[in-house]
Image: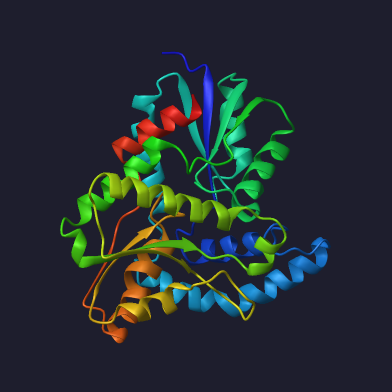
Amino acid sequence: MKKTKALVLLNMGAARNKNELETFLLNMFNDENILNIKSSFLRSILASFIVMLRHEKAWENYKLIGGSSPLHKLTDILIKKLEEYLPEYYIVVANRYTPPYANEAIEKIMKQNIEDVTLLPLYPQYSTTTTKSSLEDFVNTSEFRFNFKIIKEFYKDELYNRAIVQNIKDKINNYGEYNLIFSAHGLPQNIVDNGDPYQIQIENNVEILSEMLKKQNINFESISLAYQSKVGPMQWLTPSLDDSLKDFKDKNVLIYPISFIIDNSETIFELEIEYEEIAKEIGINEYKVVTCLNDSDIFCEAIKNIIK
């Protein structure tokens, strides 16, 4: 079948090796949506300083997961699956901070003589630090060559949330013995105070999922929300996952990474290694992490539904 449209999956990207980890960090901290400093010169100086401080420690963490994020391989698997669900779409990925970048995806689409392009950021909830950054990068790099259809968020999609519920059901069946924590990537409080809708959408998503679980008679001992990945001294969204885990000594905890679609260093290292160690120190009885949706069949159906 001739491909008449293009679907671009937008994401942050991830490091495949030590050099690419430095590239990732430099590009991320040079992003004005991350470091809100208007002067690109000053921002680049501060970015270089931050990377100098963080690169080696970040690499030590990466080595614990084999020295490479699984995000790229899992994204390739998702694309192969989506090609079956969306035969009329030419599907590519464009990352913000590591290859393949937007310009590479644009070149591929242009070679296919495709004009209609759907942009799907793989961030379920909208944030200026993720969604806005990725969308602006792609559209500006394209110099508005295409007819764009833009998906800004999809956390309310019923099939998407059904996919999450299914992943939770696949992990355990003795729900009443576990406390479910939806873990979201944190944001500095000042970003939210300046109008970023991320926190509101995360909380709304937790409400939607809690109601879906209740309707299916999936009753956890408790359901709560916490934020992971805090760095630096500034105030971040609360409660932090570190603090939330302290409430569950001698209990069982199940974590679902609600702001992530594809497993990456922040789910594989942070949630499955770093926070598990914290859970053991606290005295949590059992600590389990649900995988991201990755190439879930229901999620592929959800994408088909979302873009159409």
| Image location (x, y in percent) of residue 10 | 54, 43
Picture quadrant where residue 82 is located: top left
Residue drawn 67% across the image and 44% down it: 137
Residue drawn 39% across the image and 64% down it: 224
Front residue of 91/245: it is: 245
Q: Establish if 304 lies above or below 233.
A: above
Residue 73 makes an appearance in the image: no
Q: Establish if 292 lies above or below 4.
A: below
Q: Establish if 254 lies above or below 146.
A: below
Left or right: 235 as drawn, with respect to 14: right
Residue drawn 41% across the image and 44% down it: 75
Front residue of 255/231: it is: 255
Q: For the image shown, how many numbered marks are present on the structure? A: 0
| Image location (x, y in percent) of residue 158 | 40, 36
Q: Establish if 12 lies above or below 220.
A: above
Residue drawn 70% across the image and 61% down it: 30
Q: Quadrant of the N terminus?
A: top left
Left or right: 52 as drawn, with respect to 73: right
Q: Coloring scheme of the render?
A: rainbow
| Image location (x, y in percent) of residue 49 | 68, 76
Left or right: 208 as drawn, with respect to 230: left
Residue 196 makes an appearance in the image: yes
| Image location (x, y in percent) of residue 129 | 63, 56
Hey, which residue is sitting farthest left in the picture? 174
Picture quadrant where residue 254 is located: bottom left
Front residue of 270/68: it is: 270
